Amino acid sequence: MSAAAFLRSGGSREVSPSRPNALQYAAGALARRRLSEAELRARLAARGYPEGDADAAVARLRELGHLDDRALAADVVDGLRARGLAGAGRISAELRRRGLESARAVAEVADLGCAVDLHLARAGGRRDLRTYRRVYNALLRAGFEPDAIQEALDARFPDVSRDDPA
């Protein structure tokens, strides 16, 4: 192997001119999409990079600030809340799916009161049984706990009886 090929390979013993080394591949993957450390490791393993090369690439990218699970978790939560007002359950599931279990504490930022108010604003401020049910179901689908939803809605719908036929 020539010195130039060795340097291009990042010091890897196996050099293929058509295959980037683990660091190059990982940097390219992160340039295309923000990934968690777990997602990046899974991609490197799927491409057949040795675990040692993957560890070195992940460490270097973390050192350079290109791989930050905490910041990614915060962005995931913000994105879910902006798109669909996801509750703690859905946020936790997405963080688990992305390999961000250690950042699950970020899921605590899901604020039910804010979500209820935003849904009510979208409903034009109507305070009838139909709106109550729509907001309840939307928040339930978003992953909020049923008892917490009911408590929050009862405080905002004091004149609506859920026993009314609809």
Image (tube, grey):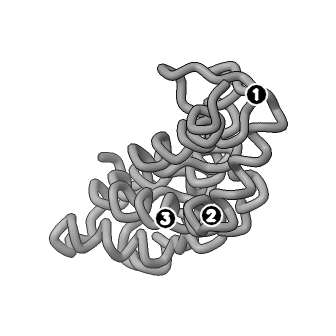
Of tags 1 and 3, which is closer to the observer? 1
- At a point 48% along the width and 77% down the height, the residue shown is 113
The amino acid type, in three-letter code, at marker 1 is Arg
Sequence-earlier tag: 1 or 3: 1
> Which residue bears the numbered disc 1?
13
Q: Is disc 2 placed on a helix, strand or loop?
A: loop
Of tags 2 and 1, which is closer to the observer? 1
> Which residue bears the numbered disc 2?
68
> Which residue bears the numbered disc 3?
75
Horizontal arrangement in the rendering, residue 92 relative to residue 113 (left or right): right
Name above or below for residue 92 compared with residue 46.
below
Horizontal arrangement in the rendering, residue 140 relative to residue 12 (left or right): left
Q: Position of residue 119 (x, y in %)?
A: 31, 66
Viewer-proximal residue, 60 or 72? 60
Sequence-earlier tag: 2 or 3: 2
Is disc 3 surrounded by few (<14), some (14 to 19) or many (20+) residues within 10 Å? some
Horizontal arrangement in the rendering, residue 73 relative to residue 163 (left or right): right
Horizontal arrangement in the rendering, residue 51 relative to residue 137 (left or right): right
- Determine which quarter of the picture holds residue 118: bottom left
